[in-house]
Amino acid sequence: MDKKEKIYTILKEAEGVLSGEKISAMLGVSRVSVWKHVKGMVTSGIPIVSSPQGYHLTPDPNSLLPWEFGVWQDHIHHFREISSTMDEATALARQGCPDFTVAVAERQTLGRGRMNRTWFSGDGGLYFTVVVRPDIPIVSASLVNLAAAVAMATILRTLFDIPASLKWPNDILVDEAKICGILSQMETEGDQISHLRIGVGLNVNNSPEVDEPTAVSMKKLVGDHVPRRQILISFLNNFKKQLVNFDADSLIADWRSNNSTIGRHVTITTLRKTVEGKAVDIESDGGLVLQMADGSCETVIHGDCFHI
Ligand code: BTN
């Protein structure tokens, strides 16, 4: 634990205000040193209030600082501003980071979505990438994306009463307005998955409709500011449970029961082509079965889906 982390822990455990003198005695450093550390912590966004009596940490359920994550603490890499959490996760993964390492940012300057689109990433949203190393065949990798989408949709429905539905493969909608997007990237070693990077952008307290008129935020839906930490912790718990007890059949069943794509006419766009048809089913590997105008069926395994 470095000094800042120790000060944070001491203030968190203290009830009310703690004097600089007491903290300096506990740490074995001067009061000036405590003051300098606290100043740095306040600058980096930690809500410590100073008064003549000492220092006081105000509880902040919105904080995404690693120290607030309990058992997940060592997995969290937090950034105030970053190009994209995908880039940071790539670097961490290639350095051999453990399963379920998370890069999370308050803001992204080059946030990106599927098909090279920009993902607007202003203050208030939840932007993170999880590195996972599932022991499953490469052909099942798409199911990990579905699992992430199922996990987040479940949280929106059960914890916040938001009627979230899944648009194939892993967008989350509320009445056709996008609330969450997931971008996944994979690296392989021979015929095995080395790691997957699952990037999640959730509109929480940001105002996505400014840049994307068809998007919506949790704040708008629930009518109040929504703390983000509980969402990330719940997501990690749910997602991990699914990957540890990986069960493709029950995952597909969960996806089916929460989706709004099957039964719809859709266009699916890939970097090379666009196909149009009626979505009639999802296969066990996550592919979407389309019924074409001539009655034949075609399965698409990736692409961007538009409900028409
Ligand atoms: C999409 O719907 O197109 C996917 C959007 C994914 C956005 C997230 S935000 C965190 C992570 N970092 C990025 O640059 N993109 C993903």
Image: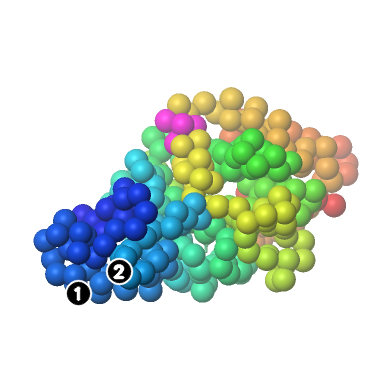
Instruction: Report the magenta residues as a range.
Output: 239-244
Nearer the observer: mark 2 or 1; the answer is: 1
Identify the mark nearer the N-term, 2 or 1.
Answer: 1
Q: Which quadrant of the view contains residue 39? A: bottom left
Q: Is residue 208 above or below residue 109?
A: above
Closer to us: 274 or 198: 198
- Identify the residue shown where x is 63% and y is 56%: 225
Is residue 146 in view from this perspective? no
Q: Which quadrant of the view contains residue 269? A: bottom right
Q: Is residue 194 above or below residue 64?
A: above
Q: Residue furthest right?
A: 294
Instruction: Please tell me in which quarter of the rendered image ligand 1 is found.
Output: bottom right
- In the rendered image, residue 4, in percent from the top left (x then y), is placed at 26, 62
- In the rendered image, residue 168, in percent from the top left (x then y), is placed at 69, 45
The answer for how far apart the CA atoms under marks 2 and 1 are is 10 Å
Closer to us: 36 or 111: 36
- Identify the residue shown where x is 72% and y is 54%: 223
Magenta segment's dominant SS is helix
The residue beneath circle 2 is: 38
The answer to whether mark 2 is within 8 Å of ligand 1 is: no
Q: Secondary structure at mark 1?
A: helix
The residue beneath circle 1 is: 32
- Identify the residue shown where x is 42% and y is 64%: 47
On the picture, is 171 further left or further right than 23? Answer: right
- In the rendered image, residue 78, in percent from the top left (x then y), is placed at 39, 60
Q: Are marks 2 and 1 in contact (CB under 8 Å)?
A: no
